[in-house]
Image (cartoon, rainbow, N blue to C red):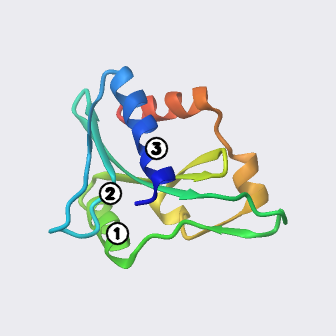
Amino acid sequence: MSALEKNFVKRIMKQLRKDGCHAQRHEDKYSSGIPDIEFCKNGGVVWLEAKVIRIMPVRSTTKIRFDWRDDQRLWAEDRIAAGGRAYGILQVSRTECLLLWHDCPELPLDELRSNALDRGSLAQILANLYI
């Protein structure tokens, strides 16, 4: 995990805890595919895989790729098939977007920009995931 991704995860964790969630960051060298963050509130459990793309592409038609590894994709598919919730959260430069796992493979940059979240709305969306 890059330093940028670690900082992104830290900020998400801080927001989740501020919102009263029990949040856990996962780093497990023995299991593969498990997302970066698991959080729970009011009995609802949500898993987030965080990705960071350092530089915003210049062309609006550039496809942004949420780079799930195969083991991450399989884990998310199994979790969702069992009724769980798994999401990708992507930061491109300073733009953030929360994506359902099946929306993650590619997203045009102009669509990402139109669905971008500001810091306040990111907090609100995360708060609504566990309702």
User: Callout 2, which amino acid?
Assistant: Pro
In the picture as drawn, the residue positioned furthest to the front comes out as 3
Residue 11 x/y as whole percent: 45, 35
Instruction: Read off the residue under disc 2.
Output: 35
Q: Is residue 46 above or below residue 18?
A: below
Residue at the spot 79% in from the left edge and 57% down from the top edge:
110
Question: Which quadrant, please, contains the N terminus?
Answer: bottom left
Mark 3 Cα shell of 10 Å, populated few (<14), some (14-19), many (≥20): few
Is tag 2's residue or tag 3's residue first in the polypeptide sequence?
3
Give the residue displayed 45% in from the left and 61% down from the top: 101
Splitting the image into 4 quarters, where does residue 60 fall? bottom right
Give the side of residue 19 with respect to residue 120, left or right: left
Q: Pointer 3: what residue? A: 7
How far is the residue under mark 1 from the one under mark 3?
A: 20 Å
Tell me the distance, in whole angstroms, between the alpha carbons under discs 2 and 3. Answer: 16 Å
Q: Which secondary structure lies at badge 2?
A: loop
Q: Residue drawn at (65%, 33%), measured in percent from left and top? A: 118
Please determine whether, in this image, residue 43 is positioned above or below residue 18: below
Q: Earlier in the sequence, mark 1 or mark 3?
A: 3
Q: Quadrant of residue 27?
A: bottom left
Q: Assess disc 2: are there few (<14), some (14-19) or many (≥20) residues with their C-alpha within 10 Å of its C-alpha.
A: many
Badge 1 marks a residue whose secondary structure is: helix
Q: Residue beneath label 1, please? A: 72
Q: Residues within 10 Å of mark 1 (few under 14, many from 20)?
A: some
| Residue type at numbered disc 1 | Gln
Quadrant that contains the C terminus = top left
State the residue at coordinates (54%, 66%). Answer: 66
Mark 1 in CB contact with mark 2 (< 8 angstroms): yes
Question: Which mark is in front, 1 or 3?
Answer: 3
Badge 3 amino acid: Asn
SS for dot 3: helix
Q: Relative to 46, is 121 on the left or the right? A: right
